[in-house]
Amino acid sequence: MTVSRRLFTQVSLGAGALMAVHPNLNAASTKLIERTIPASGESIPVIGVGTNRYGVGNDKAAKATLKQALGKFHELGGTVIDTAPSYGSSEIVLSELISDLGIQKDLFLASKVDSRNLTQNTQRFNASLERFNTKKFDLMQVHNFKDWENSLALLKERKAAGEIRYLGMTTHMPSQYELMEKALREHALDFIQVNLSLANQRSSSQRLIPLAVDQGAAVLINRPFGGGGVFSTLSKAKLPAWSAEFECESWGQFLLKYVVSQTGVTAVVPGMTKARHVIDNIQGGMGEMPTAALRKRQEDFFDAL
C-alpha cells in the first residue's frame, strides 16, 4: 500500500499559528527565506508552488480545496507560482482562483510554451496573457526542449517587446541535461528549471546547477519529492533526531531543506493542493538549513532505507 503525504504532515491553523504550534521556532525561523535572481538582483521566496495538479476543470469541491491552499500560500509569504498550458485546465483554474483571491499583484507568475509548433506556441503565449489578464509574465520558459531553438527565439522577441520579464528553459529528464548545458552556454538565460531530489535525482546539483551559477542564471527546482512513492519509503523510518539541527519537523521539510540548502538553488516549486501541505512545505524554506555534511548524512540515511 502506498503511504500518502498526509500521514507525515502536521495540521496547522494559519500563519499566525506557526509560532504557537511550533514553539521551538524563533522569529527568524518563521520568515520565509528569499534568494536573489542574478539577472536583476530581485529577490523571491525559496518555496513556490507547482500547479500541474490544478487541472480540476469545473469540480467545485476541488476548486474550493485549491483556493484554500493558494490562499494559505499567499498568506504565508509565497509568491512564486509555476504553471503551463499543458497541465490540462490548470492555467484556467489557477487564473480564476488568483482573481477570486485578489492576489495577482503580489505574485511571481511563471508559465511555459510547450508545443513543437511555433505558430501554436505563439497562440498559447497570447492565450496565457489573456487568461491571466496581464500584459507581462514574470517568467516564461521553453518546456522540455520542445522545438527549443525556435521557441527560445520567440520568447526573446516577446521579452524585447516587454511581455516577459525573465526567460528560461525547463527539463525534468536527465536525457536532456546535455541540451540544457548547451542552452546555458549559448544563450543568455535568466532561469533554468530542473529536477533535484534526495529521493532519486541528485545529479543536477553537480552537473547543471553549478553551470547555471557560472552563467548567471537563477535555478528553479521541480519534483523535489522525487515522486509520490518517496513517502512510502520514508514510512519505514522515524525522522532522525539529528534533523533538529536544521529545524526539521516533517519528512516534507526533510526533503525540501535538502534541496533549498544547495548552492545555486533560487526556489523550489513542489506541487501543493491542500492547505496543510502548504503550511508544512513553507516551513521547508524557513530557519536553519542543512550544511554540506548534514546533506551527506541525509543521503546516507535515505540510501540505507
Image: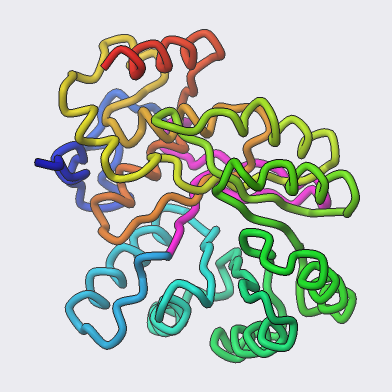
Across and down, in percent, residue 123 comes to 67, 90
The quadrant in which the C terminus is found is: top left
Q: Residue at x 25, y 32 (%)?
A: 22
- Please give the name of the residue rendered at 68% of the width and 60% of the height, measured from the top-left corner: 145
Check the image and report above or below for 300 versus 44.
Answer: above
Q: Nearer the viewer, residue 139 or 4?
A: 4
Quarter of the rendering occupied by the N terminus: top left
At 69% across and 65% down in the image, what residue appears?
Answer: 142
- Please name whichever residue, 153 or 77, is drawn nearer the observer in this view of the structure: 153
Q: Does the segment drawn in magenta span residue 210?
A: no
Residue 61 vs 79, above or below: the answer is below
Q: Is residue 50 highlighted in magenta? A: yes
Residue drawn at x 43%, y 32% is: 200
Question: Residue 93's quadrant in the figure?
Answer: bottom left
Residue placed furthest toward the left:
1
What x and y, as percent, mark residue 271?
A: 39, 55
Q: Which residues are magenta?
A: 28-51
Q: In the displayed structure, does residue 135 sit left or right of residue 250?
A: right
